[in-house]
Amino acid sequence: MKHAVLRQRIKPFMLPIAMLGGILFHDFIDKVEFLAPYLIFVMLLITFCKVKPSEFRITGLSWSLLAVQLLGSLGIYFAILPINPDIAQGAFICIFCPTATAAPVITCMLGGSVPRLATFSIISNLCVALTAPVIFSMMNTDGAIHITPTEAILAISSRVAPMVILPLALAFLLLYTAPKVHRAIAIRQNLSFYIWAVSLFIVVGRAISFIIKEPTEKTGEMLCIAIISGIVCCVQFLAGRKIGRRFGDKIAGAQGLGQKNTVLAIWMALTYLNPISSVGPAAYVAWQNTINSWQLYRKAHIGHNT
């Protein structure tokens, strides 16, 4: 009983500790970063074992969040473009970037609808894979790697599909072929939290290492991009919560719009945009996980997510 109480008291501080650890030990992240995809896969498998195939439905929530993701990203890009193209791209990619593959895990911890969030995660990632090549080609960015739209779709899909589709398919396969194994996994949802803490340690450490390598003469511009990234992050969580409330699930709405696949965003920025714009999603790692930590803390101490 004492161990259970201790775990419950420590739990709200696990994510901040993981983030701090990533900052302090970023020089050693390259030795363990290969574990990140496997950790996310296991996290999602545990989470998806909690839901049934019949619960996955495309609803008005999915379409509303997708509209903000696409139209909002283009809107902020064209609004900032006359001022500074690099900052415009940094803000754009923070909104255009699809929902994080781990978002269903946090949604489950906060008491939101996993099927709704997982459905939108698939739609969000698929939409980015299909529209990104067209949008990036219109931006015509100097210094970016230019590849054909087909190559771009395949490249983005190859980074997204395994992390979203495979654990979902495996969860459904276990449901029908090995129900006892499926049930044993489903009842261990708490494991997802601790796996996520380790994943966060790796992601934050990688983001810090990435930012440190940027040229020092760009510090002012990088700071502006990082600040705007934080503003965009807060706005997306708030907007997602407001939209989600209209459809009866403010948590799924907030996480669907606010929690982003920053690893994919950094790669897309480095590949298709001016490389400095990748500071936006790199900073977004800290912003979104600070908000997630605060939400989990409130959930643990208040008993509900307000």
Image: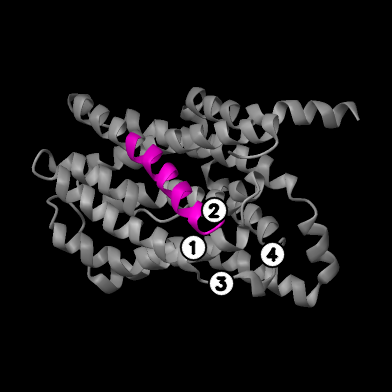
Give, as a single range, the part of the protein colored magenta.
231-249
- The kind of residue on which mark 3 rests is Arg
- Residue 245 point in image, percent of width and height: 51, 52
Q: Amino acid at mark 2?
A: Ala
Of callouts 3 and 2, the N-terminal one: 3
Q: Which one is closest to the eye, mark 2 or mark 1?
A: 2
Residue at 29%, 70% (x, y): give it: 151
Tell me residue 108's x, y (percent): 65, 50
Question: For residue 57, which numbered disc appears in the image?
Answer: 3
Tag 3, which secondary structure? loop
Residue 252 tag number: 2
Image quadrant assignment for residue 176:
bottom right
Taking the magenta stretch, the answer to whether it contains residue 233 is: yes
User: Does 215 appear above or below 169?
Assistant: above
Residue designated by label 1: 120
* Kind of residue indicated by mark 4: Val
Neighbour tally class for label 4: few under 14, some 14-19, many 20 plus, Cα within 10 Å:
some
Task: Check whether the beta carbons of the residues at disc 3 and disc 2 lie within 8 A of each other.
Answer: no
Q: CA distance from mark 3 to mark 4?
A: 12 Å
